[in-house]
Every structure is written in C-alpha cells, then in structure tokens.
Amino acid sequence: GAVVSQHPSRVICKSGTSVKIECRSLDFQATTMFWYRQFPKKSLMLMATSNEGSKATYEQGVEKDKFLINHASLTLSTLTVTSAHPEDSSFYICSARDWGDGYTFGSGTRLTVV
Amino acid sequence: RKEVEQDPGPFNVPEGATVAFNCTYSNSASQSFFWYRQDCRKEPKLLMSVYSSGNEDGRFTAQLNRASQYISLLIRDSKLSDSATYLCVVNKGFGNEKLTFGTGTRLTIIP
C-alpha cells in the first residue's frame, strides 16, 4: 500500500530553537500534503495544506510565519516550527491522498519543547 | 455545532461482542467519508471508506445516511486487537480534499 514516511518520530528541543519535520511519499507522488496537529486526547486539527511548487494554505488561526511549509518536490514536504515554545509541544502528523480513495498518514512526530 | 461529532466513549465491551459507533456531520456538501483507527500515540490508519450503499469488510460494516448526515460503524465478533480509538472523518465539501476529524471513540475489548 501507499507509504508516507515522516521523521523524526520524536524530538526534544529547547525553547526558542527551530525544528524541521520531513514528510515523504515513498511510492507515489503527492502534489498536495496536509499537516495536522494533535494535542493529547484531542482530535487531529488541520494546520495547513502543502502544495507542490506553490505556497501553502493555512487554516484560520495558524501562524504561517511560525509554521513554515516547503513542498519543493512531488514527494517531499517539510514543516519547520520556528522559535518553538512549550505550547507548541504536540503530535504533528502529515498525510497525502494516496492512489486509492483514502489518505495515508505519516507516523507522526512528537515534539517536546523544554 | 461541531463539524463532526462522535460519542467519545469509552466503550468497554467483552471479546466477541458486537459494538456500534455513530457519527454525525454538519456539512451537507461533504462527499467523502471514512473510518480510521488510531492506536495510542500512533498515526491514524484507514479502516474503511464509507459509501452510500453501505459497505462491509470482514467483521466491519459501515453505513452512511446522507439525509440524516449520519455515519455508523459496526464491529462484529470483536477481538482484543480491535482496541483503539475510532475516528469518523469527513471531507469539507465537494472536491475538497481537506478532512475534518471527529474527536474519536475509544474502544477497549475486555478478555
């Protein structure tokens, strides 16, 4: 089946530093990828839609200058959390529409900002 | 009203029992419907898509009622491995690839 590889799976960083998360579609091309955030015992919330070769579109309330998205190729999208703070600690997950009618998710990145 | 509403549970049922989950959605323009399962601290995995005619995959049956904007999932002969959180997922409208997730229903199968 379709595979989306996401890494790192876990990262701990100091407050004020930046963290880059990568999401790759391994066996299919993804012109569009989606970035979600999930807080404990909460639902996945869409942060932004990553579009290959163009600017990402952000959901209301998501700061585009804080969460930088780059989708430079058909198989790679990156999310950079800039100047991370403890309240940014969360589970970040990417997904892409696969060749079927579903969406394949990356394995997620657990970010802890100390 | 939430875009996608689910009973959060938890549902604790004995092994072998049948369990049903319900979900309602508010956007009548939604066209794609899914059930995903999510294990603790893991990513969601597609369980099944949901079609208007209803669909079955082994022990799992999904139903969609567009008029009532209601989706259901039935699990028969539940196994211990079915313990997970079940997410009702709906797209945001015709041709819209964005998804809205329900908060999930936590299921625990008891031996």
Image: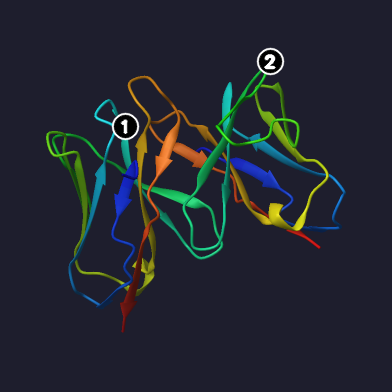
Name the element at disc 1.
Answer: loop
Check disc 1: other Cα within 10 Å, few if <14, some if 14-19, many if 20+.
Answer: many
At horizontal 24% and vertical 29% (from top left) the residue drawn is B28
Please give the chain letter of the residue carrying mark 2. Answer: A
At horizontal 78% and vertical 53% (from top left) the residue drawn is A85
At horizontal 66% and vertical 27% (from top left) the residue drawn is A75
| Residue B81 circle label | none
- The type of colouring in the image is rainbow
Q: Quadrant of residue A13?
A: bottom right
Residue type pointed to by label 2: Gly
Q: Quadrant of the C terminus of chain B?
A: bottom left
Name the element at disc 2.
Answer: loop
Check disc 2: other Cα within 10 Å, few if <14, some if 14-19, many if 20+.
Answer: few
Considering every residue shown, the one lying at the far bottom of the view is B111
Relative height, residue A78 to residue B57 (above, below)? above
Between A74 and A32, the residue placed more toward the observer is A32
Viewed as shown, does residue B19 lie left or right of A42? left
Q: Which residue is mark 2?
A: A53
Q: Which residue is mark 1?
A: B32
Asked if residue A49 shows in the view, the reply is yes
Q: Quadrant of residue A94?
A: top right
Q: Quadrant of residue B26?
A: top left
At horizontal 33% and vertical 71% (from top left) the residue drawn is B10
Q: CA distance from mark 2 to mark 1?
A: 26 Å
Counting from the top left corner in percent of width and height, residue B77 is at: 20, 69
